[in-house]
Amino acid sequence: MFDTFEDVGDRTHRDLERLLQRIVWLMPQAFFVITGRNRLQWAEEGLHGQLDWAGPTAWRGLAGHLPGSRGHSGPTVRQVLIGDFSPEDCDDHLARRLSQGGQPLIEVNLRHTIGARSHGLPLYLDLAVMRFLEIRRSGRPPQPADFGDFPALIARTVSDLTTDERHVLRSVALLDAFSVPLATQVAGLTHDAAALRLTERPFIRDEPTGLWPFHLHQVVRSAIRHAEDHTDDRWSPRDWQRAAMRVLTALGHEWSHGPQRERAMLIGCLR
């Protein structure tokens, strides 16, 4: 098992990643589990020369959109995004995480409330468990109102993002959905690299058929917009106001210069 795989290096210097990939390739009899915050790129053609084996032919199970497959949920896909627990999974996780005398410590109604507010995000469930224990130690029973937006969720989400990626993340939190060019405009950047990297993160959802194909996980978006931000590069009210102005300008440009000035585009811009 290779845990926290993002720590092997960055996507420019792949020496250690190349070594680990070689181990995986030369041991087909072994079952490898590789976990991390980013998707493995080994199935991309553009990595030929950087890694010994690259492309969908070598790593068919890592290619997300092969002809004849069913996308990320297809039976041949080996990349599993852990970020959308079902309500049953949320309840089971909370019931098993804390127990006393063989019984769940968090009562069933509170578990359901936490699970609903988590929208299946495992990080939210972990923070809720910590909040539960903190309140319980104070001597009063935890209440549903105690579990809203967690400021720590922001810090944990942006902990390994670059400065530009954090900037894009906060900018797109103002949008229901976005594309890479729209995210770049809203962030006021002159290059797409940060937005492209951000779309590979597990808290970004991908809907290829949408007018704009990407959107933030609802809980992450809510925390960024409403929770108190204690990070060093947090935005001031004026920063949010400037970002809102960039949003309006970018959406106006989308409407006036888009290839299809139709009802769906208008409604999307208004939303």
Image (cartoon, grey):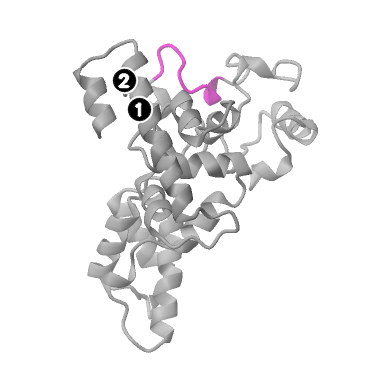
Task: Pinpoint residue 87: horizontal percent, then vertical percent.
Answer: 28, 52
22 to the left or right of 67: right
Determine whether 189 is above or below 202 in the image: above
Task: Name the residue nearer the viewer: 111 or 11.
Answer: 11
Q: Quadrant of residue 247?
A: top left
Task: Name the residue nearer the viewer: 144 or 82.
Answer: 144
Q: Which residues are magenta?
A: 60-69
Q: What residue do we see at 37% from left, 61% from top?
A: 149
Task: Name the residue nearer the viewer: 200 or 62.
Answer: 200
- Secondary structure of residue under mark 1: helix
Residue identified by numbered label 2: 255
Task: Name the residue nearer the viewer: 190 or 100.
Answer: 190
Determine whether 160 is above or below 179 in the image: below
Q: Is residue 125 visible?
A: yes
143 to the left or right of 29: left
Identify the mark at residue 251; answer none if there is no mark: 1
Q: What residue do we see at 54% from left, 42% from top?
A: 167
Rounded to the nearest angstrom, the CA distance separating label 1 from label 2 is 6 Å
Query: Label 2 crowding class (10 Å Cα cut-off): few <14, some 14-19, many 20+?
Result: some
Q: What residue do we see at 36% from left, 25% from top?
A: 212
Task: Pinpoint residue 125: horizontal percent, then vertical percent.
Answer: 40, 60
Asked whether the residues under the numbered discs 1 and 2 touch, taking CB atoms below 8 Å apart as contact, a structural biologist would say: yes
Identify the mark at residue 118; answer none if there is no mark: none
SS assignment for the magenta stretch, majority: loop
Membership of 68 in magenta stretch: yes
Q: What residue do we see at 31% from left, 20% from top?
A: 255
214 to the left or right of 62: left
